[in-house]
Image (cartoon, rainbow, N blue to C red):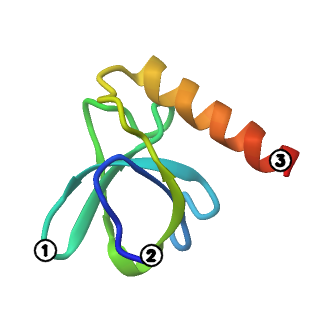
Amino acid sequence: MDIVKGQIVRAKAGRDKGGYFVVFILDDAFAYICDGKSRKVEKLKKKKYIHLEPTKTIVEKELKTNREVKKVLREFISDEAGR
């Protein structure tokens, strides 16, 4: 499964292993991700694709603030826990 902009991904490696993030920017080798808490919209985390596990959830609306990102991820995590 390819990673696309707006997709929710889980970190498979690094300090943020196991955390969920939203993809903001894609380039040839890296995805720039944010969770709104430790990795803010103002300073995105650069992560290699091999260190990310994509989910099936893609956020359609454009997220502009840390509060919006945190809300989307909170809802996603609660939905995952309910399954």
Which callout, 2 or 3, points at the residue further toward the start of the chain?
A: 2
Front residue of 77/46: it is: 77
Q: Quadrant of residue 26?
A: bottom left
- In the drawing, does residue 57 fall left or right of residue 76? left
The amino acid type of the residue labelled 2 equals His
Q: CA distance from mark 2 to mark 1?
A: 14 Å
Label 2, on which residue? 51
Q: Quadrant of the N terminus?
A: bottom left
Q: Are marks 2 and 3 in contact (CB under 8 Å)?
A: no
Image coordinates of residue 41 in percent, x first then y, are: 31, 32
Residue 30 appears in view: yes
Q: Relative to residue 14, is residue 9 depicted above or below?
A: above
Label 1 crowd (10 A; few <14 / some 14-19 / many >=20): few
Mark closer to the observer (1, 3): 3
Mark closer to the observer (2, 1): 1
Image coordinates of residue 12 in percent, x first then y, are: 56, 72
Label 1, on which residue? 28
Image coordinates of residue 24 in percent, x first then y, are: 28, 46
Label 2 crowd (10 A; few <14 / some 14-19 / many >=20): some
Q: CA distance from mark 1 to mark 3?
A: 33 Å
Q: Secondary structure at mark 1?
A: loop
Which callout, 2 or 1, points at the residue further toward the start of the chain?
A: 1
Mark closer to the observer (2, 3): 3
Q: Residue at x 59, y 64 (%)?
A: 17
Which callout, 1 or 3, points at the residue further toward the start of the chain?
A: 1
Label 3 crowd (10 A; few <14 / some 14-19 / many >=20): few
